[in-house]
Structures are given as structure tokens and as C-alpha cells.
Amino acid sequence: MTKERGVKREEWADLARNLDWTLSYVEDKEVFPPEMSGSPWLPQTAWAGWDEPYRTTYPEYVATQYEKELSLAAVREALGGVDDFKKLPRTWLDALKLHAATLPLAEFAAVIGNLRAARFGRHSAWRTTATFGALDELRHTQIPLGVMHGLVRWDEQFDWTHRFYHSDNWVAIAARHMMDELLLGANAVEFAIGTNFVFETGFTNLQFVALSSLAHDVGDRLFEAMVSSIQSDEARHAQIGGPVLATVALHDKPYAQYLLDKWFWRSWMLFAIVTGFAMDYLTPLAHRRQSFKEFVEEWILDQFLRSAAEYGLARPWYWETFIAALDHYHHMVYASAYTYRASVWFNFVVPGPDERAWLREKYPTSWDAFDPVWDRISDRWRASDPGNDLAVHGTSIVAFCDLCQIVLCGGTPARNTAEVIERGGRKYVFCSAPCRWIFEREPDRYEAHKGVVTRVLTGEMPANLIALLRRSFGLTQDSWGKDAFRGEYPWLKRESR
């Protein structure tokens, strides 16, 4: 067809997006079973108004992605060598290792979630957009795997970009517990609300926008280009969630509110670690623009509440608990993870006087409670030989939440918020009231899961710490986490011997 005789986009795009038809020889529920499509199960007419603002067509999608790939490949060719990474601050490299391990294979699981929506979503335009989403997520898997693979021979810890979710490391257990439910086990409706609306609209800005900005300041132009390229995809298929949430809220508002509350809390717990560590501890002080709390306030609080209100939904019932956690939670987990740093695959840093002054300025109502923790850790380093990492390290196995599977770090150093219930003759411990609430809403979904402590008590994992690191967590002395400076800080005066 010649250009002169061609049909304009606006004349065919809507027709191509609306390809649903009336089924004549089977029932709708046979084609879109509730178990896969989700609840509330509604007649096809209820989904007729589904729409998303991007309205991307396949030719447009291919052309845009092609340009993105060319641009990213050029940056990778120019700045993706080992020597380029060797120039970066060592703590920034640990932020990369944390990011690179927790997200790429989760993105691969999101391919499955999107493909489920591409088959069982209740509107043809939803299914088409989810198909693009599946292609996006495959790309988001491949990019960091390719970038980090070239660094493995230089630093074995980068191998965890691929190994992480295949291990029984305690962080992997926690992340997999969430990602499997959200990305592999959720039906099309829960996936759209939990992933596309809450996770991607509400939280990926933290990781991709915040870290892109920090990467620019640090001088890591490849990582900046990589996450910016990924975020432009996320912004498009994040638009799936709103129209789905609007329809569910119209017909079953309590269920819509539950999914919103559940996945906001679970997403917060993950990003408080992945982004909170990077922003407040692992980015060199000279390159920090905002605190983690400030970025959450700017990019999540107003936007999320405004978006929820558009669909007639309230803020989560635990909102005050969440606001309080902004001042404490990631600091609590970081101090715990530093103490048990050999149990992970990246290194940590002790905040020095200047870093602690900055943290006190950013967290004026809470930081005084954390100063004594770092005083004790600093004192232990002063009394130890430089480089003797295990001399300043925890030795017992810590307890984990039976919902989120993260260390019991809720609350403050003075008051932990752990809660306990008994069910079927077994006690379950939770880090917080929201985690307990999610468990009690869907106990059949969670009660059979085995955390680290349960596996140790049943003999599935060894109780000895070194054996646990080697045999169960898949770590070696070369790959397990250490103090990034081996305890040798210019501000830390060692005791005279």
C-alpha cells in the first residue's frame, strides 16, 4: 500500500486495540476462568471501558525499543569495561551489586506475570499492553545480566546478579517469597494492581529515578543509562494498573483496598532495603542529594495517595506505622545486615562522623537512637586487628518474620514491633502489625512457608554459621560480604597494643 493510499493511525489504532468478540459456543468463564483472570469475576461488558493513555501500537513499540537498544549499546561499548567500573567509589559498587542481584531475575518472573495477563486479561487492549510488558521485562532481565557478567572475573560478588534467586540465601528467600507470589502466583487482576499499579507506579521510581540521579553524580554513566532506559519501559506498562484498579474498585471496593494495602506494604519492605541502603549508606557522602526519606516523601507519598483517591480508595490503614518506619526501618535493617554482613554477597560501610552528622540532619527525630549502635561497632573495630572481619560480626542465627521473611527489625532500637500469634499448634512471629494482618487475611497462602530458622530447626540447614554460609547460602570467603574498608577508616583510632 502506498503512502498516499495508506490509512492514518487514528483511523485504525482503536479498531486494532479492541478485538474482543462475543463467544458463541463456550461460556466466558471457560475462556477466562476466575482462578486465572482474577476476582471479582465480571461480565465482559464491565471491562468495555478499559483504557490506558499510551495506546502504543506494535510498529511504534518496535521502533522505540530499537532506538533505545542502539543508544544503550553505544554507552555500554564506551563505558562498560572493567577499567570503567574500577574508577567508581567502592561503596557505590556495592549498591550496584545489591540492585543487580535483587531485580533482574525478578524482572524475568514478571515476564510470566505479564504473559498471564496477556492471555487472561479481560480486555483486548489490556492483553496487548501486557504483551508489550512481557517483552519489556525480558529486556530488563537481559540488560543487567549482560552488563554485570563482564565484571565477574574481576569481582566474584557480581556473579550474584544471576545466582541470587537460585540460592537459599536469607535475602533471596525473602525476595523470592514476595516475587513468586506477586509475579508468578498472582492472577491477572492481582498482578495488575500489585505489580503495575503499586510496585511500578508507586515504587520503581525509587530505584530507577533515584539511582539514575545518584549514578550521574557518582560518574557511573552506564548505570545511569541502563536504569533510565528501563524506567521508560516501566512508565508505559505501569499504566495497566490504573484501569484495572478502577474497575475492581467500582465493583468490589473492599477487595481493591485490600490489594492496595497489601502490596504497598510488601513493596515498601523490599525497597526500604534495596534503595534505602544505597541512598543513605552506600552512596559517597559528597554525591548524596536527598535522604531516602526525602525521596520517598517526594516521589511516593503525595503521588500514591493522590492516585488512590482518584479511585475512591483510602490510604492504607497502617499509614501512621509506615510514616514512622520512614525514620527507622531501613536504618534498623542496615545495622542488622552490617552485623551479619558475611551472610550476603556485597560489602558494607560503617558511617563515620561526617556521614553520621548528615544522617542526624536528615533524621533529626530518630538518628540519636542509632548512634550508640555504630559507637559499639566502631569500638569493636578499634579493639580488633584491621581486616579481621569476623571479629566484628554476629555469630548466632537471627530470627525472621513469618510473612516478609526479613529480619525482625520493625520498630526502633528501644522498642521492637514484633507480634506473635498461634495457629494450628504453631507460633508465628511477625515484624509488624501489617505483616501479621496480611498473614491472617490469607493464612493458607503463607503458613506452610519455611524460613531460615525453621529450616535450621528441622535439620534442612546447618546451625553453625560458617557451614550455613557455605552450604546453604552458597557463599565463599571470597564472595561473602565484608566491611568495605576492612575496618581501616581514617577517623577510627585503634587502641594501642
Image (tube, rainbow, N blue to C red):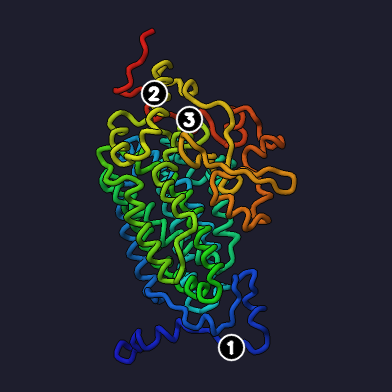
Nearest the camera: 149 or 180? 180
Nearest the camera: 12 or 72? 12
Query: Image check: 159 left or right of 53?
Result: right
Nearest the camera: 239 or 230? 239
What residue does disc 3 label? Answer: 339
Q: Does 43 appear above or below 454? A: below
For disc 1, the neighbor class at 10 Å (few under 14, some 14 to 19, many from 20) is few
What residue does disc 1 label? Answer: 22
The percent coordinates of residue 339 (x first, y second) are 48, 30
Q: Residue furthest bottom?
A: 5
- State the residue at coordinates (37%, 12%): 495
For disc 2, the neighbor class at 10 Å (few under 14, some 14 to 19, many from 20) is many
What residue does disc 2 label? Answer: 378
Among numbered discs 2 and 3, the one appearing first in the sequence? 3
Distance CA(mark 3)–CA(mark 1) = 61 Å
In which quadrant of the rendered view does residue 121 lie? Answer: bottom right
- State the residue at coordinates (35%, 89%): 7
Res. 107 in view = no
Distance CA(mark 2)–CA(mark 1) = 70 Å
The percent coordinates of residue 45 (x first, y second) are 54, 85
Q: Nearer the viewer, mark 3 or mark 1?
A: 3
Label 1 near label 2: C-beta < 8 Å? Answer: no
